[in-house]
Image (cartoon, grey):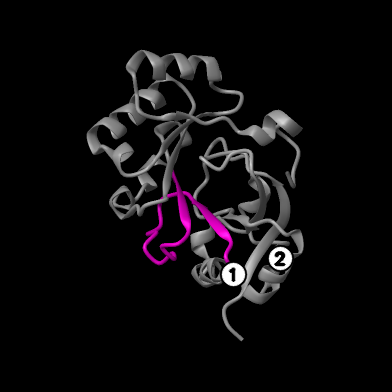
């Protein structure tokens, strides 16, 4: 029968983040996460309780109903689920452009190299920075990207140091995202400009379009 997936929701929206921001995208949100970021904006996906058990075929059929080429597998934490690498491979086989957003505390190596990993490196303000597997920065492949959510100036300085020490910007686009309600985009933009950092300012478009509390968008 194959491994099953615990799915919280599958829906079509506008991609709100990364270099793919603005494109129509189908989101596959898995259920269950093994970290607890203090600013988590998807708390309904932290637990697998009440989610739907689906086969890879079930998920593929639902995704294909929406007719979008771009698909994001997110969570929760998608790499907790054994069937996610198979799902990603099958989506790539069907000529979908696939993004996988992962918290960065699980090895990304099992994922098909045709997908784009969006590696969400956790800053101290998240409360879970100790869980980062920074070896993932060396595992990035062409097409992968890095995201850091920043809550304040201390987070910015930590993230700036990470970029400058590791040179990760030479391997992948790096996105600095202001935490909604904690850090003003204008402040973050000024810091990036003052330091001439080689990073993108990443705003969550879906929150500006539909508001921060609307689900399924």
Residue at 47%, 18% in the rendered image: 189
Q: What is the distance, in whole Å, between disc 1 and disc 2 at their CAs?
A: 10 Å
Quadrant of the rendering where the C terminus is positioned = top right
Q: Is residue 122 left or right of residue 209?
A: left
Q: How many numbered discs?
A: 2
Q: Nearer the viewer, residue 170 or 133?
A: 170
Residue at 67%, 68% in the rendered image: 59
Q: Position of residue 166 (x, y in %)?
A: 25, 38
Q: Position of residue 123 (x, y in %)?
A: 41, 35
Crowd tier of the residue under label 1, counting other residues whose Cα lies within 10 Å: few below 14, some 14–19, many 20 or above: few
Provide the residue designation for mark 2. Answer: 64
Can residue 211 be seen by looking at this rendering? Answer: no
Q: Nearer the viewer, residue 184 or 61?
A: 61
Asked whether disc 1 touches disc 2, contact meaning CB atoms under 8 Å apart, the reply is yes
SS for dot 2: helix
Provide the residue designation for mark 1. Answer: 94
Task: Check the image and report above or below for 7 versus 190.
Answer: below
Can residue 166 be seen by looking at this rendering? Answer: yes
Q: Is residue 205 left or right of residue 108?
A: right
Q: Is residue 104 magenta?
A: yes
SS for dot 1: loop
Which residue range is magenta in the image? 95-120
Residue at 57%, 65% in the rendered image: 95
Instruction: Answer with the quarter of the image where residue 180 lies.
Output: top right
């Amino acid at each position: 029968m194959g491994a099953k997936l615990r799915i919280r929701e599958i829906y079509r929206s506008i991609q709100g983040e990364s270099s793919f921001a603005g494109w129509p995208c189908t989101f596959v949100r898995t259920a269950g996460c093994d970290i607890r970021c203090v600013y988590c904006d998807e708390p309904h996906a932290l637990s697998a309780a009440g989610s739907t058990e689906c086969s890879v075929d079930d998920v593929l059929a639902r995704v294909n109903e929406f007719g979008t080429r771009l698909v994001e597998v997110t969570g929760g934490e998608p790499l907790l689920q054994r069937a996610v690498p198979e799902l990603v491979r099958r989506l790539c086989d069907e000529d979908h452009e696939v993004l996988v957003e992962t918290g960065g505390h699980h090895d990304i190596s099992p994922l098909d190299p045709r997908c784009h990993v969006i590696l969400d490196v956790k800053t101290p303000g998240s409360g879970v920075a100790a869980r980062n597997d920074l070896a993932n920065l060396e595992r990035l492949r062409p097409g992968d990207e890095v995201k850091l959510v920043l809550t304040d100036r201390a987070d910015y300085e930590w993230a700036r140091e990470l970029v400058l020490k590791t040179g990760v910007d030479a391997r992948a686009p790096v996105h600095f995202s202001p935490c909604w309600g904690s850090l003003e985009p204008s402040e973050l933009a000024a810091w990036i400009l003052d330091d001439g950092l080689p990073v993108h300012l990443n705003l969550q478009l879906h929150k500006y379009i539909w508001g921060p509390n609307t689900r399924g968008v």
